[in-house]
Image (cartoon, rainbow, N blue to C red):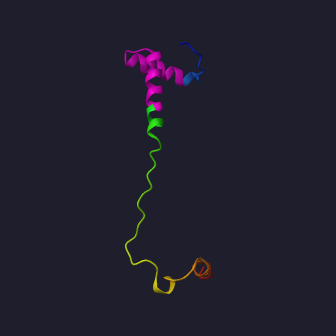
Amino acid sequence: MKTTVEIPEPLLREAQAAAREDRTTLKALIEAGLRVVLAQRARGPTFVLRDASVVGNGRQPEFREAGWDHLRDAIYDSA
């Protein structure tokens, strides 16, 4: 199927040079690029939340049974 795609001139020149270097066509390079992008999208997001756990015994004794209001007041009153 034929279609028209507008590509910025610097990107087109870079792609043409890459195709020549790889001894392939611009069409093949574009197809390969689209396949890579579509495969990445199919795999889904790659974000992984880092483990920010800390070693300890939880809250300090005076805050173990405290509600949010008490915690908030302690945080902002001490500033």
Residue placed at 59% from the left, 19% from the top?
5
Figure label count: 0
Q: Residue at x 48, y 82 (%)?
A: 64
Most foreground residue, 77 or 53: 53
| Image-quadrant location for residue 21 | top left
Report the front residue among 16 and 51: 51
Q: Quick one: which residue is furthest to the bottom in this view?
A: 62
Residue drawn at x 43%, y 30% as measured from the top left: 36
- On the image, the x and y values in percent for residue 76 come to 62, 78
**Looking at this rendering, what residue extends furthest in the top direction?**
2
Q: Is residue 54 magenta?
A: no
Residue at 37% over, 15% down = 23
Magenta segment range? 11-38
Q: Is residue 58 above or below residue 50?
A: below
Q: Position of residue 53 (x, y in %)?
A: 41, 66
Q: Main secondary structure of the magenta part?
A: helix
**Quadrant where the image shows the C terminus:** bottom right
Residue 44 percent location from the top left of the image: 47, 41
